[in-house]
Amino acid sequence: MTLVSDSDSDSDSDSGAAVRDGGTALALTVTEVAAVGRDVRHVRLADRTGGPLPSFTPGSHIVLSCGHHADGRPRRNSYSLTGAEFEPHSYSISVRLDEHGRGGSRWVHDLAVGDLVEVSTPRSAFAPVLTARHHMLVAGGIGVTPILSHVRAAIRWGRSFEVHYTFREGDGPHLDELRDLCSDRLHTYHTPEQFWAAMDPALLDRPLGTHLYVCGPSGLIEDLAGRARNAGWPDARIHYEHFGVGDLDPGSPFTAHLRRAGLDIDVESGVSLLDALEARGVAIPNLCRQGVCGECRTSVADGAVEHRDLYLTAAEKDAGDCMMPCVSRAAGSRLELEL
Ligand code: FES
């Protein structure tokens, strides 16, 4: 399971000159902006010198520093890379505008050619399995962005693939590009009925060694993964990328006690535990800050957790001995962490 992207799944964080979790920050220039669908803006970023950028695995994302929240806190969002992965001279993202979001997509849509943007180096969380005999790529709406990167790589390396793309009629970002790349390997759908009428038999029909990749809304991912399992697909051959948990209610304040450090940290309503830890200088590895990548997993010594992530299994959540501090909180007034 992986990441977030491409609409307005803002994450709150302390971005500085360097990305906190150890990634390198790059200062890139906007070299192109274009509409690639209804309310979808494509942005190309390159080094000012035109030099090569770090290569990446298909399905990777970058984290943009997207201005600040109204209260002054820096905002960072993850966006999937849509371009070619090998020796890139630019990074491309496509972002759907969400006027009801927390401002990240608006910020990206307001970018103009020549603007300077701070981004992380690419991170991989939705990579193709190189030993797969066939790749079944499924995209819902703006979830097409990492799928596009998979398609380019599959063509480059001569891998067997097919694409199933479902979107509202007249609202398919990157549709023309996909048609050019895939020709008859692209299948498009405009209604759930059309989509499932094609996918159900396709899931039953694919040969051993086929891997399934899906990116789109959570409902689509859960439904497709469930039907694939029912059709006999093992979990190891099902790969998916979420958009993240979306807007969360601010939650109640609580105190996090760090057992090893002997520290008490107050976590206010509307502030994530991860943000509160970082604000006190406690570094926690993190990647998506959206409860989907698993990177910030932290051991819990005592106290009940209000799990809000999309990463832990139901059994792990029931066990209550770990949590994702980027989105999850204490269920009561106090939590003890193995930190
Ligand atoms: S940083 Fe990804 S789950 Fe917390």
Image: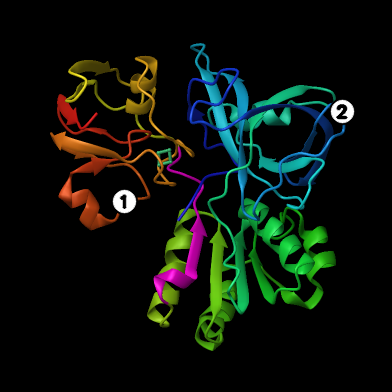
Q: In the rendered structure, which amino acid carries the disc numbered 1?
A: Leu
Q: Where does residue 122 sit, x and y in percent of width and height?
A: 63, 42
**Mark 1 Cα-neighbour bin, 10 Å: few <14, some 14–19, many ≥20:** some
Number of labelled discs? 2
Query: Mark 1 or 2 closer to N-term?
Result: 2
Say whether marks 1 and 2 touch (CB < 8 Å).
Answer: no
Question: Residue shown at 33%/39% (left/top)?
Answer: 324
Q: What's drawn in magenta, residue-wise?
A: 234-246
Q: Which residue is mark 2?
A: 49
- Residue matched to label 1: 312
Residue 80 coordinates in the image, percent (x, y) = 63, 46
Picture quarter containing residue 157?
bottom right
Foreground residue among 224 and 46: 46
10 Å crowding of disc 2: few (<14), some (14-19), many (20+): few
Q: Which mark is residue 44?
A: none
Report helix, strand or loop for mark 2. loop
- Any atom of ligand 1 within 8 Å of the CB at mark 1? no
Q: Position of residue 222 (x, y in %)?
A: 42, 62
Camera-side residue: 106 or 289?
A: 289
Q: Position of residue 339 (x, y in %)?
A: 24, 28
Q: Is residue 170 left or right of residue 190?
A: right
Residue 180 versus residue 37 in the image, above or below:
below
